[in-house]
Every structure is written in structure tokens, then in C-alpha cells.
Amino acid sequence: MKWVSPWRLRRMGILGMNCRNRDFIGSYNSRHLFPLVDNKLKTKLLAEEYEVATPRLFFVVEQQHEIAHIEKKLEGLEGFAVKPAKGSGGKGILVIIGRRGDKFIKSSGAEITIEDIRRHMSNTLAGLYSLGGKPDMVIVEDLIQFDDSFEGYSYEGVPDIRIIVFKGYPVMAMLRLATHASDGKANLHQGAVGVGLDIATGRALKAVQFSKPVTHHPDTKRPLNEIQIANWRDMLLLASRCYEMTGLGYIGTDIVLDKVRGAQLLELNARPGLSIQVANGRGLLPRLRHIESLKPRAHRTPEQRVDYVMRTFTKDGL
Amino acid sequence: MNKPSRVPFYSIIVGLIVLGLGTAWLRHTNMEIPFLAGEQRPVWMIEARVDFFASGDAVVANLALPDNPPGFRMFTEQAASPGYGWSVIESNEGRRGEWTKRSASGPQTLYYKAQFVGGLDYEPTLEPQTPQAKPVIWDGPQATAAGQMLAVALSTSSTPQSMTRELIKLLKDPSPDQNASLMLAAEPNMATLLEKLLNQAGIPARSAMGLYLEDARRHQSLTQMVEVYDGEEWVLFNPATGQQGVPENLLIWHRGNQSLLDVVGGRNSRIGFSMIYQTVPALELARAQTNDNIFSIIGVHRLPIEEQSMFKLLFLLPLGALVVVFMRVIVGLKTSGTFMPILIALAFLQTSLGLGLFSFISVVSFGLVLRTYLSRLNLLLIARIATLVVLVIFIISVLSLVGYQMGLNTGMTITFFPMIIIAWTIERMSILWEEEGPKEVLVQGGGSLLVAVLAYLMMQLPLIGHLTFNFPELNLVFLAFIMLMGQYTGYKFSELRRFRAMVENETVEDKAGGTK
């Protein structure tokens, strides 16, 4: 068991949890704005209002009795995702990619019945997946057809891109790839692969799994250093616009790349994790402090901000 | 964004610490609440024994009692005399104790016991009105002799004190002059004579009876002294030695010209004093102080005992909270439920550590086993928690019964565990188990127990219990530390390990780059 000296971490500019909570979340995120991101339904409606691309909302289930005739509402939907509005950490997300007769096919390939979907929805309404067990709502939205460029990079799950946006400036990004070990989930601590992305180019910098460097996807064996996100600037723009949309100063944006519809905002996180630093092999603090030192309203539009970070936060630069 | 100034915050922190420590110190010095548990203080136990021969009629025995003797504070007093009524009468003339009995005959013995704390600062007793010298009447020749003596003393003195000293010198002369001899012949009691002479000279003076304290003495009597008013305060003189002021080992028992002891309905009355130097717990001493000191208002000693014992636990909570904040913010330990560890630690205080740990772990593991079955029943969340609460109560009752059957009375104390909290713990652990696997359950459960044990180890220290209960204001200091830790933005201890990988990855790359 080895320890690192705190001075070493400070030199590397690593953001610790206390510092994140107090100096960034506590200082830049107003409490009253949290519900906008903690409730996926609110985020979605807000995103539609601000014309931020997001997976299409099919319908919402708010009451237990609606579940009884849910099959009517699901009629004609080939693939869809069932999500709790207030879920966290990817809990309670059920992805149906198709049908076979009466059965529904999950993303893992397993078949489930309408009864299973009903039970899942009922659990969600009772608050099984929500923070603090509060009563919740069920969102049923369009399925993401993930882009071919990610073919072979993700195992059983949607690869998503996490971008930390500070005061509207994208400061750090990583691609999260589900693995067999992570059970199709994109959470790093569960074993997903995190690929650090260069803010300037959208190219892979390095990749880690369980905090250890990896060069190939552990399941598909595809080399990770070849990754280059298409339409990178659009993706940064989408992330940057979330600042105007929510008013939150420090957020994590989860974005997926749809084959047809392009970059889509999946969800926002007002308390984004710190492991993005491990995936990038660099600390967040220098970039955050740099943004803090900028003049207020130095860049007024998302375009200006994105251009600025693409110039400034390069691989060898800040 | 402008960073708000840190000055107000740090002033609050310093203010809280100063307020807490300052109040504690003031209460310590003013009310003599000891900082250490079990501290002992010496006190003088003085017993006055009154003997007389009752003639068969109603008896009233009236004894002068000490009234705020300078340098001493009375701690307890009691009268032990079978068959006698006892009351303390306070008047302008001082305190007096009175024993009464309808009829008594034969030898009687009455006791009065009092404990005094000595060694205090001498505080002059303020007189509401300036005392006046009493008129003195002498017989013819003595009047002349007194006048001459006073004239001599007056010419060699300047203040009431020096006048008194000069008079004592004249009276104590080994070969006294004619006047002194004449006066001593008429009034052999030097103290009374001195008092009369001073009053004649226009200096207010009164007699005082003092008791010299010496450990384990019996059959002592009081020494008669003279107090002289110098215009501001009474100054004590010992006419036998000429010594001025109150010696540390002198307790002034009685002042003024009233008699020390009056017995009606008896004869041959005698009084004797015995004394012993003993120690009592300092805390008891402080508690006995029922004066309306503003500092005693903050103490909880005035509450009924039942509430006091509740406060004893309540005042331990801030320390537990401090431990939790430290372990989570500075060390970065994961716990299940933020403050659940404190509640567990409080339960440990009641059950003892080993038994508490054993019963907590067994209740939670039983609960987890039952919960896995519940999850198959597919109940709604609220109903599931409620079911768990009921099950936890049953588990606890069964464990108590088993413990009792096995002869472990301590098994009963298991009921001190907060059951709702345990039910929630089981629910959370169970979800954690399903979602993150048993390892995370062990990490968080172990973290909670570790914090609980640490908090328990701190809370069970007798010194901590003593300080938090007797100096509740010290909790302000804990509050200040908690707030201070709320400002900590440095790395957690656990992060030194968590981000270790980054440093290692970096060095690996450096090496790889070097070999290229």
C-alpha cells in the first residue's frame, strides 16, 4: 500500500473532493438550480426549450395506475429506454433494443416480459432508484443508435462522453466505455474504461481501467489510442450551452453521439466525479483556476468559449 | 467571482473558542468546578460539642455560629442531637443555632458540625453604616488611669491600628507602669480591657472569638480577640500577641458582645471544639455552592437528575459529530449514513463495546439475510422498510431473550440500539450489496463501525464525560473545530491513495519515454 504526498498532488494540480465541494460546487452552483439537473425530466424539458439536442421523450409515467395499461403506450415503439427521473449513477435504467413476439429484448440480449417492465416502473415510482428513496417518475425516451465510429469500443453499453464545463468553458473530457467488468455500465469505479480526450482535438490521450493504464479495450481488444471523436467542436458547443441553459457554474455533461441525430445531451450532473483526472492523467485545478482568472464576460457566446478552450487547453499546453 | 473575506469567519471561530474556553475558565475559578474528574479538595471539619446538665424543664441552648468567616467558606453544616429540635436563626447580630426540647434532665450533649473550605482570599465585610464607638464608664481611679494611658498611646500613634498596637504594647509590658497595672487589676481580661479602652478613645472596637485550626485537635476553645474599625474595615488584633490581621489558620467563629452560648433550663454548660482536616470530591464541593452566581445558570446541575443524565449523553454528541466530520472530511472514510456512527457509539456507551459490536453485527447480518428474501417478494419501498423495522424489533427481542436465558443480563441493553436507523442501515446495505457487491458493503459497514468505535473510545473517557457535562460551553470549541474543518479544501487522506495511480502512471510513462 503506497501513499502519495499531498504536495505532489498539489503540484500535479489534482482537484480533491473537499476542494471540489467547497470551492467549485459550493461556490458556483446555486442550490435552487440543483433540481434542474437532479431531475432528468426537467433537464430534458429545459434542453428542448434551449434547443439543446437530447433523446426524444416518448412519455412520462407519474402514477401507479398508469402502469396497468402501459403496453398501449409502448405500442409501436421498437426500441426505447426507461429511466427514473431522479436516478443517479446510471441506476434503474432499462434499455430495450427490440421486440420478439410478446417479449422485449434488453441491450444485453436477455428477453423480458411486459410484467418485468411493469415491476421496474413500479419500483421506480416508489423511489427505489432515487436519491433518498423519494417518490419518482418514469421517463420513456428514444433509444440512442450509437455512431459507427464507436463500433468495437463499447461492450453492451452506450459509450458516452463526459465533459466538465466550468462557467461555460469545457475544461476536461473523457470517453467512457462500458466493459464486461462494468456490466454494461459507464461508471469508472465499476470497471468501465475511461479514455481521456484532448480538448483541442477530441483525440484520445490515454486510457485507464480501474485506475491502471490500458491500451486496448479489454473485451473487444480494439486499440484505444486511435479514437478520434467526430464533430468534436459541436460536442463541445453542446456542452458549453448547458451553462446558459442551467446557470450552474460547475457541471458534468454526459453526451452521446447518435448515428442519425448527432451529439445528444443525455444528462447533467451537478456533482461530477473526480476520476476524469485519472483518465486524462492531469489535474483539473490549473484549468479551473485559469478560467477563474479570466475577466467576467471575456467570451460571451458558447462559440467564443469553445474556440478559446480549443486554443488554450491543448495536449501540451495548460 | 469575488471570494468573500475570510476575516468574519475566522473571527467567529476565534470568538467561539475564546467564549468556550473563557467561560469554562471563569466557571472553574468562580465556581471551583474542577477540570479533572475525581479531584479532591481539603476541607476543615469542625465539631462544636456543647455539654450541660439539664434541670428537667424546657431547654433552649443557643450557640453563636460562624457567619462568613474571612478566608473560609462554609460547605455543609448540620446538628446532631437526638430528641432536640434545631433551627438556625439569622439576625443582624449574626447567625445563631438553637436547640430546643420540651423537657430534659441529666447530662446532655449537643453537636454542631460544619465543613469549611479554607485558604480563600480575605474579603473585607462591608458595613452598611459606619460603626460608632460605644460609651465606656469607669470607676473614678480607673477613669484617670485610662485617660492617661490613652494620652500616652495617642501621642505615639497616628492611626487606629497604631493606636491599638501602642495600647497592646503598654498592657503587655513585662513591667507595666502604674496605670496599666491598675487597669489590668480591674479588668484582667486583656481583650475586654483593650476593647473598652479603644471605645473610650473614640475608636469603634468589638470583641471576636476565633478558633485556631490544627489537624486532629480536640477540646479546643475559642480565643478572644479584638476587631478595630479603621474607618474602612474591621482589623483583627490578637491582644495576647499583638498580631494584626487574620492568620490563615484562624476561623472567626463569632463576633460582637453577645455571648457564645446561652443555655436556658440547664447548668454547668461547657463548649469544646474538635477539628479534622479531610478531603472531599471537588465536584461535590462545587455542586454545594447554591449561590446565584451567573455562571451556575449555564450549568445543568440545577436540573432534575433524570434530565441531567439525558444531558450527559446529549453533551457527548458534539464530540461524536467532530469525530465523524474528521473521519469523513480529513481522512475520507466511507460510512453508511452520515451520522449513524454517532448513534451506534451512543448505543455502545450503554452496552459496552464488545457486546455492542457483537449484537450490532449480528442484528445487521440477520437483517440482511431476511432482506434478501424480502427483495424477492417485490414489496413497495415504504412497506419494505416498515417490514424491516418490525423484523429488527423481533431480532432484537429474540437476541435479548436468548441472552437472558444464557444468564447474560447485559443482553437486555441491546434495546438501546436505534431500531429505525438499523432498519435503514440494513436496507441501504442490501441495495449496496445488489448494486456494488459485498466488497462495498464491507467497506462502508466497516467504515461506519470504525468511526463508531473511535467515537465511542473518545466518549467513554471519564475526563471527556466530566468536561462535556460540567463545562457544556466547551462544546463551542468543538463547534469551532467542526466549522473550521468545513472550510478544509485540502486533500483527504484517502485521496492520497486514490490518486496514487496517476503518479504511478506518470512515472511509468516517463520510464517508457526514457527508453525510447
Image (cartoon, coloured by chain):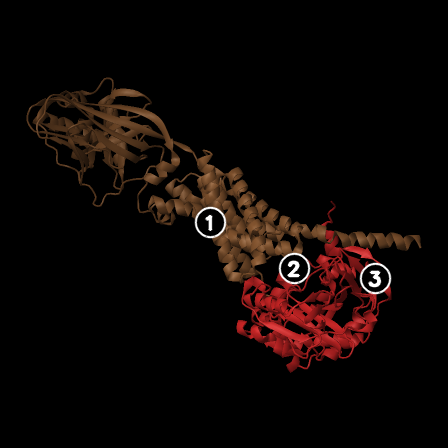
Task: Judge whether residue B477 can be spotted in this image.
Answer: no
Check the rendered structure and report the hue given to chain B.
Answer: brown
Name the outermost residue toward the top.
B175
Residue under disc 2 on the same chain as residue under disc 1: no
Q: Nearer the viewer, residue A97 or B264?
A: A97
Residue B161 placement: quadrant: top left
Residue B318: x, y in percent? 49, 50
Q: Disc 2 vs disc 3: Cβ atoms closer than 8 Å?
A: no
Q: Nearer the viewer, residue B357 or A47?
A: B357
Mark nearest the camera among 2 and 3 is 3
Q: Nearer the viewer, residue B169 or B89?
A: B89
Quickly name the residue at label 3: A220
Chain under numbered label 3: A
Which chain is in red here? A
Quickly name the residue at label 2: A19
Chain under numbered label 2: A
Residue B464: x, y in percent? 48, 41
Alpha-carbon distance for marks 2 and 3?
37 Å
Q: Callout 3 environment at 10 Å: few (<14), some (14 to 19), or many (20+)?
A: some
- State the residue at coordinates (59%, 45%): B450
Residue under disc 3 on the same chain as residue under disc 1: no
Quickly name the residue at label 1: B393
Chain under numbered label 1: B
Q: Amino acid at mark 2?
A: Cys
Q: Quick check: B240 above or below B399?
A: above
